[in-house]
Amino acid sequence: MPASKICFQGELGSNSHEACKEHFPDLEPVPCATFEDAFDAMKSGQCGLGMIPVENSIGGIVSHTLDALVMTRLTLCGEVMLPVHHHLLSTHAAMDEIEVGYAHPQSFAQCRPWLDARLPTARRDPVSSPGQGARRAGWAHTQQTCPVGSARARAHLERRVVRLVLERALRPARRVLVLERHSLLWHGIPSWDTM
């Protein structure tokens, strides 16, 4: 049933997945490989809602979202500011043995001071989402790889949080739009045309 599903761009374990579970816990999250796929899932009726990031407090606008918004008839029914919490995930706590870190380029940018100070020699391999980083670290089958990801990404790997990576001073956040196919009231988020 489309009304019981919410789509997002990214993989299970990504920040967008975490946002869906936090703000719409009763809806089934549907991961989409691209922003276009997420928009198509709403347009086709596969999903009743979508949560799509539009801005990052450190990295700026998400141009893919703005491009897709210009070409859509979906209704903007709300927005949420989400704090971003990055965690270094590992199977053990020996940080001096970590050789490779996986993260989205945005996450590396937000964590750079922490990583430079504590893991200066570890290689940093960019991935498309925290969920993909968690999976790649899992595929490596070595304790020397660590993804930077959300607490939910940790649940998809059998890893534990070694450190909260971001310095408190950065306090990154992302602005996420809530979109729907039709103008309806969803979980107390009024459509713009009813305000």
Image (spheres, rainbow, N blue to C red):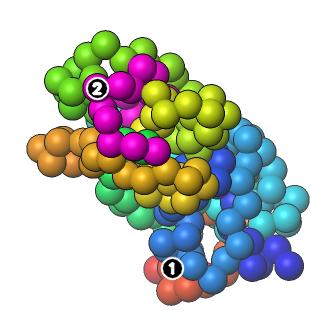
Image position of 144 with respect to 148: above or below: above
Q: Quadrant of the image for the N terminus?
A: bottom right
- Where residue 30 appears, as percent x and y from the top left, is 73, 60
Residue 116 in sight here: yes
Q: Residue at x 55, y 59 (%)?
A: 155
Determine the secondary structure under disc 1. Answer: loop
Q: Is residue 95 left or right of residue 189?
A: left
Specify the segment rendered in magenta.
Answer: 91-110
Name the residue type under label 1.
Ile
Determine the secondary structure under disc 2. Answer: helix
Q: Residue at x 42, y 15 (%)?
A: 123
**For residue 149, which numbered disc appears in the image?**
none
Name the residue type under label 2.
Asp
- Where residue 191 appears, as percent x and y from the top left, is 56, 75
The residue carrying pointer 1 sits among few (fewer than 14), some (14 to 19) or many (20 or more) residues within 10 Å by Cα, namely few
- Where residue 18 appears, as percent x and y from the top left, is 51, 61
Between 70 and 9, the one lying in front of the other is 9
| Between discs 1 and 2, the one toward the N terminus | 2
150 is within the stretch colored magenta: no
Q: Residue furthest left?
A: 169
102 is within the stretch colored magenta: yes
- Tag 2 residue: 96
**For residue 189, which numbered disc appears in the image?**
1
Marks 1 and 2, how far apart at CA: 47 Å
Q: Residue at x 55, y 70 (%)?
A: 21
Q: Is residue 57 left or right of residue 151?
A: left
Residue 13 in sight here: no
Q: Nearer the viewer, mark 1 or mark 2?
A: 2
Between 120 and 62, the one lying in front of the other is 120
Image position of 34 with respect to 43: above or below: above
